[in-house]
Image (tube, rainbow, N blue to C red):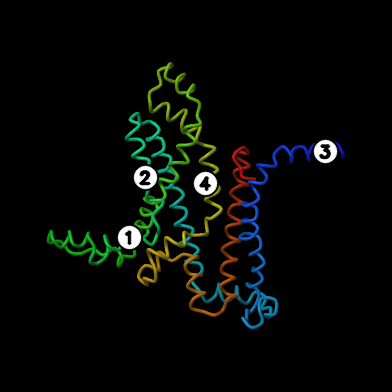
């Protein structure tokens, strides 16, 4: 026991600098991820501001009964799930595809320009993106100005519910693809060049190198990224949906998600307990999803699991 304790102390002393660098991250996680979990009790209480969290009376599962019986939680869950599935699938395809294409470019100047051009939208706020979309696709936007100048009827995207899911997916791809591409480019840079040289000596062309070397080597990164994304399967991008869709009643049917609904619920009703119940419902779904996905991956490919 003393030997183990001494060995542990030596490891701590040897890596004290790295451990100290972890302290801010640990404090951040504890403060913003673990301490707020105490607020889960609000989902089972009739919260009163005067009584506080501890003094408010317990209501059992009444908040959940009201949530599931008298609200549109099922359609919201469906919208959140389908949007995230589309974001994950199309995002992975575009991110991996662009990363492979950029890795094959030989012109360094154009390659750097393309990387910067693709990565730039990631830094643009959703507020700015919503303003840009409104000025392009709105009733008096650039698109309709061009259409009317050509003698064609106006087409306002904001009044066509059926096309909005496609619009949201395209906007998401435009903004997030650059960030994901950088991750996969870093993974491609870590692939040994000896593999490509050996394949070239055996007569493999570019497409064969991509198929038999690049893509198989990216499999671990793809699996990890997919698992991380599935952990938020029932959490939508609040900034994206709230800023672009807003309170447009025509679009809420196809573009309202759990996050925006919970936010509006908190603004329109003083019942904090029901809002907390909706948030707990969302968190439980995310937890079940990531645990199930990780269990399935562990059965198929244990080396690619998160835990």
Numbered mark located on residue 6 in the image:
3
Whether residue 78 is situated above or below residue 218 in the rendered picture: below
Return the residue nearer the eye: 261 or 20.
20
How many marks on residues?
4
In which quadrant of the rendered view does residue 143 lie?
bottom left
Q: Residue at left 53%, top 55%?
A: 232
Return the residue nearer the eye: 18 or 97.
18
Give the labeled residue for mark 2. Answer: 118
Earlier sequence position, callout 3 versus callout 4? 3
Q: Residue at left 42%, top 50%?
A: 176
Numbered mark located on residue 226 in the image:
4
Query: Residue 156: where, in percent of width, then height?
Result: 26, 65
Query: Residue 108: where, in percent of width, then height?
Result: 35, 31
Q: Residue at left 43%, top 26%?
A: 209
Query: Residue 139: where, in percent of width, then height?
Result: 24, 67
Disc 4, SS: helix
């Amino acid at each position: 026991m003393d030997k183990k304790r001494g060995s542990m102390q030596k490891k701590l002393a040897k890596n004290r600098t790295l451990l100290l660098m972890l302290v801010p991250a640990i404090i951040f996680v504890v403060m913003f991820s673990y301490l707020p979990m105490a607020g889960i009790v609000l989902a089972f209480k009739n919260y009163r501001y005067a009584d506080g969290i501890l003094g408010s009376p317990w209501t059992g599962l009444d908040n959940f009964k009201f949530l599931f019986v008298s609200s549109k939680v099922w359609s919201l869950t469906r919208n959140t799930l389908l949007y995230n599935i589309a974001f994950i699938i199309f995002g992975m395809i575009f991110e991996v595809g662009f990363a492979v294409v950029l890795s094959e470019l030989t012109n360094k100047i154009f390659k750097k320009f393309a990387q910067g051009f693709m990565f730039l939208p990631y830094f643009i706020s959703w507020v700015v993106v919503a303003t840009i979309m409104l000025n392009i696709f709105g009733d008096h936007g650039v698109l309709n100005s061009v259409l009317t100048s050509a003698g064609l009827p106006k087409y306002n995207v904001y009044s066509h519910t059926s096309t909005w899911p496609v619009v949201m997916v395209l906007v998401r791809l435009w903004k997030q693809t650059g960030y994901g591409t950088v991750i996969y480019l870093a993974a491609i840079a870590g692939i040994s060049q000896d593999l490509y040289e050996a394949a070239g000596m055996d007569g493999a062309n570019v497409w064969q190198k991509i198929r038999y070397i690049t893509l198989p080597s990216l499999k671990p990164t793809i699996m990890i990224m997919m698992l991380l994304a599935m952990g938020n399967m029932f959490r939508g991008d609040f900034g994206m949906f709230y800023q672009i869709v807003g309170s447009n009643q025509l679009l809420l049917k196809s573009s309202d998600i759990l996050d925006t609904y919970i936010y509006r619920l908190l603004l329109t009703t003083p019942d904090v307990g029901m809002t907390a119940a909706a948030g707990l419902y969302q968190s439980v779904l995310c937890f079940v999803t990531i645990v199930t996905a990780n269990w399935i991956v562990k059965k198929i490919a244990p080396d690619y699991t998160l835990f």
